[in-house]
Amino acid sequence: DFSTDIPRQVWPEDFAARYRARGYWRGETFGDVLRARAAEHPSRVAVTAGEVNLSYADLLSRAESAAAGYLSLGLRPGDRVIVQLPNVAAFLPSVFGLFLAGLVPVYALPAHRRTELIHFARRAGARALVITERFEGFDYTALAAEVQAEVPKLEHIIVAGELGPFEGVPAPAGLPQVDPSQVAFLQISGGSTGLSKLIPRTHDDYIYSFRASAEICGLGPESVYLCALPAAHNFPMSSPGIFGTLHAGGRVVMCPNPNPETAFSLIARERVTITGVVPPLALLWMEAAPKTRHDISSLQVLQVGGAKFMPEAAARVRPTLGCTLQQVFGMAEGLVNYTRLDDPEEIVVNTQGRPISEDDEVLVLDDAGNPVPDGIPGHLLARGPYTIRAYHNEPAANARSFTPDGFYRTGDIVRRLPGGYLSVQGRAGDHINRAGEKISAEEVEDHLLAHPQVYDATVVSIPDPHLGERICAFVIPREPRPRAPEIKAFVRARGIAEFKVPDQIVFVPSFQTTAVGKVSRNVLRAELRARYLAEE
Ligand code: J2J
């Protein structure tokens, strides 16, 4: 099951021609972007991490060293390389090095563990893994060794130094030609059903999305973006995130941890102008702001996205943090919506924004697939110049997730409002949105079912005041009945990200349902959730 297929992403020729003609796709690669900026302003600082400042010229030369190093291992253009790096200085040199060498990063999160990395390695057919040695007390080399033992075709474990891998290796005499219409990297999907899918994004489409995002967010050379969420997430990476900031010639500040103390001290020290967080963090920051000893007055824009930000909380952003709120509703598969910086407060507080592009086509459909009038909730589907047409190597999921004419079924339920603004109402699928991390109920159920004392398990999302949603597992135990902490420890030991471990386990004698006959898992989840909330 180790795939050797080179990832592809194909739009029909007429669409591609239109996206080029309208100037969205400009035939530029990530490497071209970095080279252009390094030529325009070599000594300007591109990245700050701790005491390290990398200028644009430094970033380019370190990326060239990395590229030379990767190629010297025998990696060839088109090969996939998993990158599991926290918010450290080495992140950007490592990744730009891959781009320069024509290699295809696969972005894992620092929280991912053995099981997830093995899945990515096999599904992507990855030949190498880039890590840091340790971060926040966790030993990534030991994890990498475990993964390699299971996937021998993952030939190389590359440990990046503080400023990237292969530090000091001379820049190569020549680098491969990279085709901007080809897949630049694989992003990880939230995994609405089962395991995470791989999302192939091209240079052309992704560069358009962050260039346009940077413009919508008013980024320029004076902008300082704090990367507070894990850099591998699509939001801090591209909306406009680290890449949008570099495209605009600004400066990225890597924040190792988004707690208010760390983030506020960096905002004050580095005079940060913009950052993006998930709603639970926004709540924490608003709590902490009145008491902080740090001067955070440089912050002009706080972006909030990844999960629904409630209007009551949204209305408090300006009074407590003294900056403009921007709501961001996006997805790694493509479509990103923003409230605009000059939108009336009413729109900013109550909507999740409108699409980036005039050529983002948005449908809101009822269950039968017919368009609903504006203002009525329906299923959101999207197609456009930076929304994928297919996942990598997923024929069954592709048939479910895309319409025959190429619209992506987002799984979100939205209302469309005047001006094309969207209000997110909920979702059709069964994932749990836990503080912005999307968790597949099915995936967690599979881990629970592996426990010998678990007869059956159903996982649902429960509203949570701090996390937005938490993971609740209903478990039918076998005798002798296991204890909840032991089940959690068992699931954790299966080698998965900590954020997927159920927050709560409720033992039930059976899954009695009102529906007769063979009940779908979705109906069962809805019933269990409703019963739980009624009893609470
Ligand atoms: C409600 N739900 C939201 C919001 C995302 C920018 C911002 C976020 C992501 C992201 C991203 C939401 N209100 N404001 O990639 O570039 C939920 C929806 C959506 C799913 C996508 C970006 N913002 N969501 O969160 O791929 O359910 O991307 O379909 O992680 O998050 O998750 P993800």
Image (tube, helix red, strand yellow):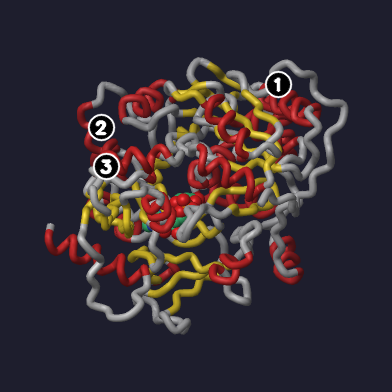
Q: Nearer the viewer, residue 388 or 395?
A: 395
Q: Which residue is mark 2?
A: 289
Separation of disc 1 and disc 3 at Cα?
40 Å
Crowd rating for badge 2 (residues with CA inside 10 Å; few <14, some 14–19, many 20+): some
Task: Please state the quadrant of the image where ligand 1 appears.
Answer: bottom left
Q: Which residue is mark 3?
A: 283
User: Taking 177 as reference, is 162 left or right?
Assistant: left
Q: Position of residue 432 (x, y in %)?
A: 36, 55
Q: Splitting the image into 4 quarters, where does residue 84 fall? A: top right
Check disc 3 and report its element: helix, strand or loop: helix
What distance separates the C-alpha of mark 3 from that of mark 2? 10 Å
Residue at figure coordinates x 34%, y 55% from the top left: 308
Which residue is most to the left?
535
Residue at image position (68%, 52%) is 202
Could you tell which of marks 2 and 1 lies nearer the N-terminus? 1
Residue to which mark 1 is pinned: 166
Check disc 2 and give the amino acid type.
Answer: Ala
User: On screen, 142 above or below 215?
Assistant: above
In the rendered structure, find residue 268 and report the number of the disc placed on it: none
Disc 1 residue type (three-letter): Phe
Is the residue at mark 2 in contact range of ligand 1, meaning its CB lies under 8 Å from it? no
For the residues labelled 1 and 3, say whether their Cβ atoms are less than 8 Å apart.
Answer: no
Residue 330 visible within the image: no
Classify 511 as above or below 219.
below
